[in-house]
C-alpha cells in the first residue's frame, strides 16, 4: 500500500505523490554503505584499509581509523555538525579541511559508538577515489539504474529538477535543502523507489546476500561489546522480530524506513514538513501493520497557535491555548517544547515582544524547567532588557548549575 498526502511545493500547488522525489537526509547513508560494499565485493578496497591510505594528509592521530570504523560510526572522527560547520552550500572539501585541522579524535578508534556525518562524507570521497567516478555517477550506474529507481538522484549544484518536494518548517516557512555535501546526505528519492530499494536487499542484484548480511551485523567495540547498529542501520526488535531502521532529518525534511526482514514488511515515509519526532507516527504505523493497539500522534498546539496568531494576533493565540488546555483536549500536544519552538520561531522573525509572551507562558506552564528560563533570558536579552535577562538566566542556572549557556550569557551581560 502506498499513498501521498499534501503538497510537494506550496506555491505551484504541486501534489505530493508516491513518485515525488524528496530529500532523504541520512537515509542517504545506506546507499553510501552499499557503494562501499560493491567496491569491497569487487576487491577494490578492504574494510580494514586505514584512513591514511586515502587521506595521507590526516595527522598521525587518525591513522588508526579504518573504513570499518567509519561504517560503524566508531571512528572517533568528530561530526561536522558539532564543529559548527553547517552553512548553505557547504562542500565536502570544506569538511575535509576542517577535520584535518583538528588536534585529536574524539576517542580512540573502536572505543565507542558516536554518530558521525563526517565519517560518511569521507566514505563518499573514498568511493570517488577508488572508482574514478563521481559519487553521483557511481550510485546512478551501480544502484539507481539497475533497480529502475527513476526518481532517485544525488543533488548537485547544476541539478535542475522539476516537481521535487520543497522543504518547509513547522510553521510553513521555507526550510529547503541547501548543502552540497554527499555521502552523509544529498540524495533525493521517492516512496516508490525506496520500496524498490528495500526489495532489492532480499536479492543478489546489487550485492550478494553474504555481503548484505555483513551490512546488518552489529558493530563490535574494542572491549568486545556490540553496538545496536550495523553499517549505519539501527538494529532493533519488535515483538520478537528483528528490525533494521533509520531516520533522516534536515531542514523541513523528515524521513524514515523500518524493515522487518522475517516478514518482508517495510514502513517508509518521506515528508517535507518538519516535525520533531518521527518515532511517533512510525510506531503507530507499525502497530497498525501488526494489528496491535496504537496511539495517534498528537497535533501540534504550536502550529495551531501560529495559525491563529497570523489572523488574530498573539493574545488570541494565547487565549486559545489556555482554553484548550483547561478543557483537557487531548488532541493536541501541550509539551514544553511546543511553546519553546513557537517562541523561538517568533524570535527569529524579530517579533520579540510576541516571543516573550509565548516564552513567559511556557515558564508559567513549566516552572521547574531550567530550559524555559534560558529561552526567556535570551528573548529579554534580544529585547535589550538587561535586568530581566539576568533574572531569568539566574533562575535557569539555579535549576541547572551545569547550564553553560546561562553562565556565559550572565558573564556577558554583567560586563555591559
Image: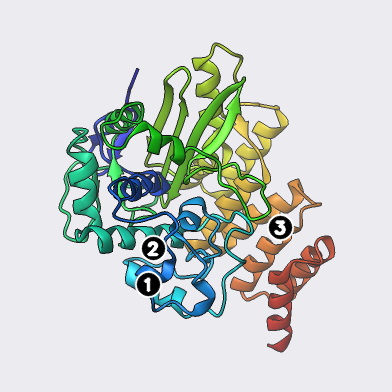
Rendering coords of residue 31 (x, y %): 34, 45
In the depicted view, which residue is nearer to us: 297 or 86?
Answer: 86
Q: CA distance from mark 3 to mark 1?
A: 42 Å
Would residue 216 be found to the left or right of residue 226 on screen?
left
Q: Which residue is mark 3?
A: 371
Numbered mark located on residue 122 in the image: 2
Q: Is residue 377 left or right of residue 37?
A: right
Tell which circle, 3 or 1, labels the residue nearer the N-terminal end: 1
Report the front residue among 338 and 364: 338
Q: CA distance from mark 3 to mark 2?
A: 36 Å
Q: Residue furthest front?
A: 43
Badges 1 and 2: C-beta atoms under 8 Å apart? yes
CA gap, disc 1 to disc 2? 9 Å
Residue 164: give x, y in percent of width and height.
Answer: 23, 43
132 or 312: nearer the eye?
132
Q: Position of residue 100 (x, y in %)?
A: 44, 77
First along the sequence among labels 3 and 2: 2
Q: What residue appears at the point 43 percent right and 67 percent down from the top-left corner?
A: 51
Q: Look at 71% across and 57% down and name the residue there.
A: 371
> In the image as oriented, which residue stretches furthest toward the bottom?
415
Which mark, residue 55? 1
Asked if marks 3 and 2 touch (Cβ < 8 Å), the reply is no
144 left or right of 349 in image: left
In this rendering, position of residue 403 left or right of residue 169: right
Amino acid at each position: 500500500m502506498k499513498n501521498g498526502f499534501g503538497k510537494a511545493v506550496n506555491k505551484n500547488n504541486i501534489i505530493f505523490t508516491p513518485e515525488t522525489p524528496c530529500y532523504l537526509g541520512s537515509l542517504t547513508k545506506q546507499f553510501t554503505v552499499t557503494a562501499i560494499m560493491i567496491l569491497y565485493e569487487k576487491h577494490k578496497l578492504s574494510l580494514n584499509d586505514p584512513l591514511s591510505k586515502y587521506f595521507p594528509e590526516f595527522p598521525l592521530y587518525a591513522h588508526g581509523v579504518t573504513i570499518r570504523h567509519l561504517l560503524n560510526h566508531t571512528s572517533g572522527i568528530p561530526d561536522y555538525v558539532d564543529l559548527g560547520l553547517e552553512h548553505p552550500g557547504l562542500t565536502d572539501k570544506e569538511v575535509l579541511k576542517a577535520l584535518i585541522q583538528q588536534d585529536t579524535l574524539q576517542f580512540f578508534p573502536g572505543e565507542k559508538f558516536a554518530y558521525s556525518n563526517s565519517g560518511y562524507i569521507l566514505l563518499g570521497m573514498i568511493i570517488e577515489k577508488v572508482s574514478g567516478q563521481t559519487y553521483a555517477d557511481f550510485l546512478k550506474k551501480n544502484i539507481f539504474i539497475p533497480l529502475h529507481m527513476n526518481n532517485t538522484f544525488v543533488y548537485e549544484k547544476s541539478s535542475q529538477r522539476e516537481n521535487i518536494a520543497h522543504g518547509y518548517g513547522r510553521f510553513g516557512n521555507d526550510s529547503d535543502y541547501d548543502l552540497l555535501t554527499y555521502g552523509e546526505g544529498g540524495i533525493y528519492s521517492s516512496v516508490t523507489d525506496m520500496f524498490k530499494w528495500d526489495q532489492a536487499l532480499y536479492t543478489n542484484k546489487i550485492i550478494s546476500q553474504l555481503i548484505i548480511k555483513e551490512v546488518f551485523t552489529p558493530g563490535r567495540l574494542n572491549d568486545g561489546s556490540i553496538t545496536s547498529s550495523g553499517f549505519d542501520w539501527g538494529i532493533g526488535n519488535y515483538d520478537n522480530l528483528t528490525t533494521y531502521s533509520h531516520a533522516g532529518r534536515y531542514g523541513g525534511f523528515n524521513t524514515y524506513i523500518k524493515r522487518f526482514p522475517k516478514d518482508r514488511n517495510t514502513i517508509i515515509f518521506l515528508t517535507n514538513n518538519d516535525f520533531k519526532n518521527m518515532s511517533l507516527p512510525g510506531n503507530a504505523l507499525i502497530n497498525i501493520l501488526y494489528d496491535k493497539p496504537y496511539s495517534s500522534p498528537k497535533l501540534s498546539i504550536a502550529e495551531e497557535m501560529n495559525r491563529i496568531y497570523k489572523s488574530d494576533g498573539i493574545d488570541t493565540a494565547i487565549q486559545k491555548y489556555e482554553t484548550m488546555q483547561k478543557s483537557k483536549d487531548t488532541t493536541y500536544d501541550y509539551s514544553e517544547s511546543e511553546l519553546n519552538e513557537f517562541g523561538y520561531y517568533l524570535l527569529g522573525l524579530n517579533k520579540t515582544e510576541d516571543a516573550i509572551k509565548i516564552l513567559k507562558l511556557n515558564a508559567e506552564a513549566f516552572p521547574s524547567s531550567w530550559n524555559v528560563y534560558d529561552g526567556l533570558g535570551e528573548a529579554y536579552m534580544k529585547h535589550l532588557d538587561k535586568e530581566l535577562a539576568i533574572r531569568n538566566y539566574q533562575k535557569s542556572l539555579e535549576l541547572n548549575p551545569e547550564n553553560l549557556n546561562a553562565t556565559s550569557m550572565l558573564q556577558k551581560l554583567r560586563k555591559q
